[in-house]
Image (cartoon, rainbow, N blue to C red):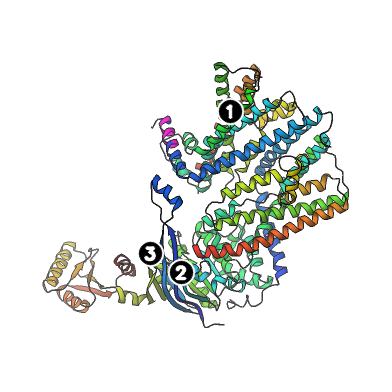
Amino acid sequence: MPNGLTVAAVHLRVSALNEFQYRSNFFLQVLQSLIQVVSGLVVVALVYDKTSQLNGWDRSELLAAVGVFTIVGGLVRAFIEPSILQLMDDVQEGTFDFVLTRPVDPLLLVSVRRLNVWQLADVVVGAIIVVVAAADLPASFGPAAAAVFVALLGSAALIAHSMWLAVACCAFWVVRLPYMQNLFHYVGRSAQYPISIYPAWLRIGLTVVVPLGIAVTAPSEAVTSRLDATTVAVVAAVTIGTVVLSRALWRRGLRRYSGASS
Amino acid sequence: MATASIEAERLSKHFKVPVREPGVRASVTSLFRREHRIVEAADDVSFTIERGEIVGFLGPNGAGKTTTLKMLAGLLSPTGGHARVLGFEPFDRSPEFLRRVTLVMGNRNQLQWDLPATDSFELHRAIYRIGRTDFERARDELVALLDLGGLVDKPVRNLSLGERMKVEIADALLHQPEVMFLDEPTLGLDITMQRRIRSFLADYNARTGASILLTSHYMADVEALCPRVLVIHHGHLLFDGRLTELAARFGTAKSIRVQLAEGDDPTAATTAVAAAVAAARGAGLTVTDGPLVEGVVTFRVDREAAPHAAAFLLGRLDVVDVSIEDPPVDDVIDKVFTDG
Amino acid sequence: MAEAASLVARPVGNVRSLLALYRAQMRIAIVGTLQYRVYNVVELVLMLSEPLVYLMVWRIVAEEQGGEVDGFTPARFAAYYIAWSMVRTFTQSGSPHNWERQIRDGRMSAVLMRPMHPIHQDVAHWLGFVIARVLTWLPAGAVLCLAFRPQLDTGPVQVVAFVWAMVGALVLRTIINDVVGIAAFWVTSIAAIGSLMQVVELLTSGRLVPLDLMPGWVQSVSLVLPFRWAFYFPIEVLIGPMSGAELAAGLAAQGGWVVAMAVFFRVVWRRGVRRYGAVGG
């Protein structure tokens, strides 16, 4: 059985090569990134035109949060979403059979098959925003803090992957629904701003029901030096929880797929 | 009303296709200078189909049959020549024209996926502006003819491939078109279903006098349904006539099928056959023998020399039964296409 | 069996068959959509998270500023964003990319063979879809109203006008999507055009923030583009206050846009079909 890492590396390389073929895609992606970023920044600009604090978050801090959101968004759209969309397509078309007959763990395979290189533009743009915003912030960013930040980004990616996977598993039960990918878009929108500015009930909702909220907030808090131990503990718990739940759903879905093939 | 249903007059369709070379350097240059080549999908195709005819379009993939069909259906505009269907210029796509023809494509779904076919039928009725009583009569007759029964009440996604095809055909005929364009209608269906659909089409043609033009890969479709055949290859019309004449025009061989008396003694039979063939060749005849199966063997001989070869072989062998046939049309077509 | 052509000889009148088409297609869309109950609920909940987030942010801003921002109290923001969620849910009408897909997988041939203009089926389908949506939205909407106590400045006339404006918004949005979508007859990928439209729509339709909060020049630009009339206008009508004259003018403008886009579509469609016939899609 081929090493999981080797499989991932090979797929990523092929995906990247594929993407490089389409130069027009690059400009398109940059355009899309700018659209997302611009809309986020426009709202921030308007909001801070009317006020100076958003429940304790000033403009630079919120900008940093928007930057983190953009980074996570970029990671999701580059590494996670293309594979998940492919998975949904395969399940609905029946070509998922080809995945199941390969000598590789199907979950690994479907997770690393596609890479949208140009979406990494978002990561770059987001990083720029964070850096620009952080320049205005008082605290400094040592190596320990950077490590925590990267770790939290990693857990955000894991949470996002589990969530996206859970949505994709819908395809095992609901065959042939157009525009299912809109669901991802909605989920993304809900995590735009750090959840610490919201009232308690919404914070809980965006931690437990749509955990992308806390996933993006934690690294934002790390950058703005607001991170506390409770948040880290909650993030850890949520990460484990979402991973476990999504795996369970995946297994259920696989069983259904194999049982219900016509 | 024009006497001819379908008239194709020197129909041609040329596509300009960009040339794509691999490699990075070529991709960059192609941004500035695009090279094209001309693909002649159909060239100078002419034929006339009268009312009530069933005509088959034969040809390998890429031969131009679907292209020609699409020009007659009004989907593609001819680069040269004219098409006239029921007196209309198809590419004008007038509603009157579209209401009198129908297009069925094998393996392609037009029906609503999640709902029973009856709902799609209603939609069809509205789009084609069919009156309620006329519609119900046509629908009931089609349900009976195609033996649909309860299939129309099940969601289309729950039907098998063959059932789906039957329902699609019913939907396509609700407005009682005078001309049916069928593009690979039996694609992917099992033998029984293929036969059912063929017999339905023949029946429908007999009852309503609708003209049918169908393209197919399956020789069986054409053999069973189409008295007349158009053979297209590389965009050119190679043949227009009866299937039986096809063998005569392009076939250069004939088959002599012989049942030997030594049927139950394979060794003796084999020896006899070998001896006969050797003798025939010795006499200057081109003879090839096929496998010997339960005392039956098929020889292939030149068309012109067939009677002579037959007499020779019959003289040499102890024969219980004999028949002289044209080779299977499949073989003829194969030969036509591989010879180019 | 009746001889072919006998049916064609007496087609049903144009208006009657159009009505029949709308009824049949809408029914199909409604039944088809309502089949997926769980999915509908999940989708609705997720859809509502976007306006919820915006609402929360602006409420905080209003509270920080002592109760209101540019005339918007928290109650008015609530009204705005609940109306926002209604318009967003009820004017969903596919995407331009559908056309691109149809051409790619050959379904365009079937569309072209129908003796009826495709726009009718499109609009009818989304009308039906939206009706199904309304049914799923109502309970969620009720909860939202109870939770946030929106404040409306309207009367019964405006509510009726709101329904009319929403239908107009749906039709307008569908036609805009179609106009952009049939660019697929000329270019293989309309992703670039789609993105461009997306930006302009985002900024001038009131999706991001209430247009009243945007700088003056953006508001002026939005008045001459169709997007505002496909999103912001119905919201305005519902949350008020709107005088009778403003209402009439607005409805006329919206109607004008619908007609203009429909005519434009017709012209471009004919060209597009000719092009499809020339290059084969």
Estimate the spatial distance between the alpha carbons at disc 1 and disc 2, rounded to whole Å. 56 Å
User: Which corner quadrant of the image does residue C143 belong to?
Assistant: top right
- Look at the numbered disc 2 and give the secondary structure of its residue: helix
Q: Which residue is mark 1?
A: A156
- Residue C64 lies, with reference to residue B7, above or below; the image says above
Locate residue B17, reporting x and y percent.
43, 59
Q: Which residue is mark 2?
A: B68
**Contact between labelled residues 2 and 1, with CB atoms less than 8 Å apart:** no
- Residue A162 lies, with reference to residue C16, above or below; the image says above
Estimate the spatial distance between the alpha carbons at disc 2 and disc 3, rounded to whole Å. 14 Å
Three-letter code, disc 3: Pro
- Residue A75 lies, with reference to residue A224, above or below; the image says below
Chain ID at mark 2: B
User: Does any portion of residue B167 appear in the rendered image?
Assistant: no
Write the residue at 39% across / 67% down. B59
Residue stretch in magenta? A5-12
Find out whether residue A10 is within the magenta segment: yes
Locate residue B118, reporting x and y percent.
63, 61
Query: Are labels 1 and 3 on one chain?
Result: no
Instruction: Count residues near mark 2 (Cα–Cα under 10 Å), then give few for <14, some for 14-19, many for 20+.
Output: many
Q: Nearer the viewer, residue B63 or A194?
A: A194
Dividing the image into 4 quarters, which one contains the N terminus of chain A?
top left
Three-letter code, disc 1: Ala
Find out whether residue B122 is within the magenta segment: no
- Look at the numbered disc 3 and give the secondary structure of its residue: loop
Circle nearer the viewer, 1 or 3: 1
Q: Which mark is residue B60?
A: 3
- Look at the numbered disc 1 and give the secondary structure of its residue: helix
